[in-house]
Amino acid sequence: MSQEIDLSPRKILSYLTHLERKLPQREFRLYQPSVSRVSGVISSALLTEECARMLAFVGLDDYRTEVSYAPLEDGVAGNISLNDNAAPAVCIQVADTHRSNWPATLATLAHEICHKLLFVNGVYSSYLGMMNEVYVDLATLYVGFGELILQGYTTTATGSKHLLGYLTMDTYRTTSVIVAAVRCDGSLSDGLLTKHCDDPLVLETLDLWRKHDDKTRAVSDAYVALQRPAAERQRNLRVLRQLLERYEQQYIDIPSQQTADRLFGEQDADALTPVAAFAALYEYNILKQNALTVPSVHKNLEAALYSFFCAMKKEQHDLPVPSATEYCCPRCGRQGRAASGKTLLVHCPCGHHFVVETHPWNPTQGQRAEREREQKQVAAQESHWLEAMPCWLRPLVRHYLKKADKKG
């Protein structure tokens, strides 16, 4: 019967969550057998009485008890007849090899009774195969038979060792800690809760569980703690959008509108009269003088765009360069799409003229800007460093710095 199936705490919790939804919720307590130990052969009367008590413990006291020891195949500790829920009796056989082993008998009864409990509550399917046994073994601990399982699945009788159950002992012990913490709500002793459990995440979760009286609030607080960095990033994106909207309005939309008005007025760019065309070129020569001075905010935006792209590229190596073929009118917001690699003058139906740039964004431009920025920072540091030196030493240091730059 021993299969040594090892379950992670996450898998254990997945099974227990399903059992919690399916099984009737009763006040949890650990089952205490009528006698703690039996010397010699176990009588049929004691076996029947204990089986009836265990059935009543899990709410199956309406069934008649038919239990006996019987010769079974090697490796089989017990079996139960699962006919239908209407059958009036629960028929269980326990292996003859356990006739003098009370702990193993109790553990076997707990396992077979939980087979019936899951069958009655719809947690059983012939298609599940071995998964049925996993559910049953975990259910024994969930309903309160944990101590019987931990004591009876590894026992010594008449000098021989019996290893029972389908799961590893570490799985049973971890499950017993989780069940005791959750179903007893921390009322059991620390020694029992942490008995043989060395999984650091389970122990950390146990400590967190016992610190909070309101478990639902604890989960909410945990979710908030996990999601707070993402919420801060969402906030930063909202701030960034507001800044970009302000930037777009101040440095793109308004100047674009003013430039279009001064060059074209109310006329179409393709239908300007000769004098109007000359006047537009005159305005161009005036405006281009102002355009020679690029506000630092534009350079900062380019550098920030490049830095952000590089940071994403480190995380996503296949990140493509973003497309720039979509556009919208600065005046009315009308959207459109243009072929890539173009610089187009668009005359919107609203009457506004504006220029669309669809050449792919070139990260190397940002790279050059970033390199220039770094060079300026280095130069400023060197200048500050030289100013602090004695005058007679500065020419010599400058000489070696120039030689180093040439080698670099």
Image (spheres, rainbow, N blue to C red):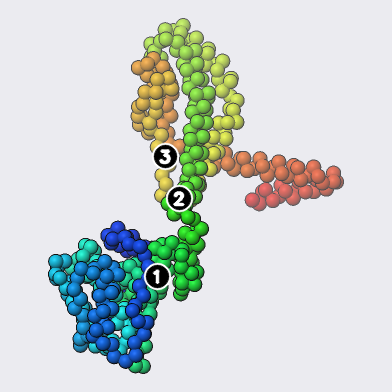
Does the rendering let one see residue 271?
yes
| Residue 8 picture quarter | bottom left
Element at label 1: helix
Q: Position of residue 55 (x, y in %)?
A: 26, 72
Which residue lies most toward the bottom here?
159
Kind of residue at disc 3? Pro
Task: Give the alpha-carbon distance from disc 1 to disc 2, as whole Å.
Answer: 24 Å
Estimate how packed mark 3 is, as few (under 14), some (14 to 19) or many (20 or more) residues with alpha carbons within 10 Å.
few
Observer-nearest of 231 and 147: 147
Observer-nearest of 274 and 262: 262
Confirm or deny contact between disc 3 and disc 2 (CB under 8 A). Answer: no
**Mark nearer the viewer, 1 or 3:** 1
Estimate how packed mark 2 is, as few (under 14), some (14 to 19) or many (20 or more) residues with alpha carbons within 10 Å.
few
Residue positioned 49% across, 55% down in the render: 212
Residue positioned 42% across, 39% down in the render: 322
Q: Is residue 25 above or below residue 349?
A: below
Number of callouts: 3
Question: Residue 217 bears which disc, if any?
Answer: 2
Observer-nearest of 56 and 12: 56
Residue positioned 47% across, 45% down in the render: 230
Q: Is residue 246 above or below residue 261?
A: below
Query: Which residue position holds label 1?
Result: 176
Which of pointers 1 and 3 lies earlier in the amino acid sequence? 1
Which of pointers 1 and 2 lies earlier in the amino acid sequence? 1
Q: Position of residue 62 (x, y in %)?
A: 20, 68
Kind of residue at disc 2? Arg
Question: Residue 322 bears which disc, if any?
Answer: 3
Confirm or deny contact between disc 1 and disc 3 (CB under 8 A). Answer: no
Which of pointers 3 and 2 lies earlier in the amino acid sequence? 2
